[in-house]
Amino acid sequence: MTFRYIGSKARVVDAIFSRIDRPKKQVRFVDLFCGTGVVAEAAARHGFSVHLNDHLSSAVIMASARMIGASAVPFSELGGYESAIAKLNVAKPRKGFIFREYSPASVSRIGFERRYFTEKNAALIDGARALIASWVAKGVVSLAEERLLIADLLSASNRAANIAGTYGCFLSTWQKQALGPMTLRVRELPKSSGTVTTTTLDASAVPVRADDVVYLDPPYTKRQYAAYYHLLETIALGDEPKVEGVSGLRPWREKASDFCYRTRAMGAFTSLIRDLPARRVLISYSDDAHVPIDALIDAMRPFGKVTPTALIDIGRYRPNRVAGGGQASVTEYLIELERTQQQVMA
């Protein structure tokens, strides 16, 4: 991926899979908080079938696009993948929703400029998104092809965004990367797709089987992903929600995570783990989290055998100078929970 995502395990994924054996038979890897899909992609390479889940459609789209094989997206009606991207790059600009709400054009309606994108780039985003929607309506592209193109548009939009790292707010002065033209790029695709299914449910509502390997990487801090990545969600959905405030936030509180509240995080962890029917659960965790890791491990012990492993130290996420205080690095852990059938059924 071409952008920073809070909690991304890109720097940790190799260490995670040094602890996970390749499956001897077809086993499903269920990623309940998939984010951009870096861990699920590695699971697919290791021979797992994969189920992706996230409350954000944009996350599921980005994650699933990582595992779409070339054979699944021939773009027969558009002359191939490269031709489809070329067509999107010359799509007619539109003064649509992104232009009206997230470029300086917003001043005419709300009295101030939202500088997420230049007017030119916002119109290019609207134009490309509208063209994808028209291809879908005409049956020109399949679901896999639609998801791949939307993921490519999200990456291109992010490269042209005038932000420090998230969409919690825009920067007041234009950064160099935001002034160039928004351009989609052809990504390198694997030859074929693995078995990948998706949902956009609350983690507790995802159907899980006893023989699944369930991976949890929930939010650990106060940052609510639905708010911090609201603009990617709007581009992904192609809708026009009622937005508000300086940041132009779309309605997001129905997707607020209990894991982001210090007083609710432990309860969210224990209830989720208690109710999971899987015999093997893997949890990525950080010592930068609301719940102290020792307290989390103690809370998990009644559910089965708990094995915590310190993986590596990584630089702490710093979206801006204000957030730059505190510890410079955090330790990433993998906590493994193994339980018997009797413990699962208890």
Image: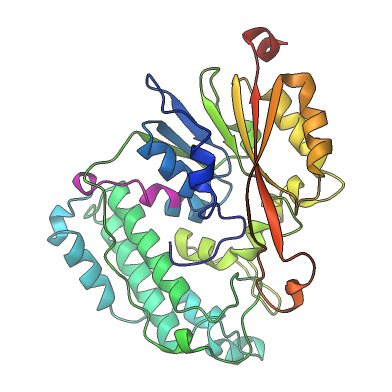
What x and y, as percent, mark residue 153? 38, 67
Q: Position of residue 49 (x, y in %)?
A: 39, 31
Q: Quadrant of residue 33?
A: top right
Q: Residue at image x 55%, y 26%?
A: 207
Span of residues in magenta:
63-72
Residue at 30% in and 68% down:
131
Residue 279, by quadrant, is: top right
Residue in front for this viewpoint, 343 or 94: 343
Residue shown at 59% from the left, 72% from the top:
165
At 33% from the left and 55% from the top, the residue drawn is: 148
Provide residue 15's location: percent of width, then percent of height.
Answer: 53, 44
In the rendered image, the residue lying farthest to the right is 263
Taking 305 as reference, is 152 left or right? left
Query: Which quadrant is home to the N terminus?
Result: bottom left
Question: On the picture, is 87 further left or further right than 13?
Answer: left
Does the image show residue 145? yes
Q: Point out the image quarter for the C terminus.
A: top right
Q: Assess whether residue 306 is covered by the magenta stretch.
A: no
In the image, is residue 83 above or below residue 214? below
The answer to whether any part of residue 238 appears in the image is no
In the image, is residue 90 above or below residue 22? below
Dominant secondary structure (helix, strand or loop) of the stretch shown in magenta: helix
Residue farthest to the top? Answer: 342
332 sits left or right of 27 in the view? right
Front residue of 76/287: it is 287
Judge whether 174 appears above or below 270 on screen: below
Give the image quarter of residue 126: bottom left
The image's colour scheme reads rainbow
Q: Is residue 29 above or below residue 344?
A: below
State the image coordinates of residue 331 (x, y, percent, origin top left).
Answer: 69, 51
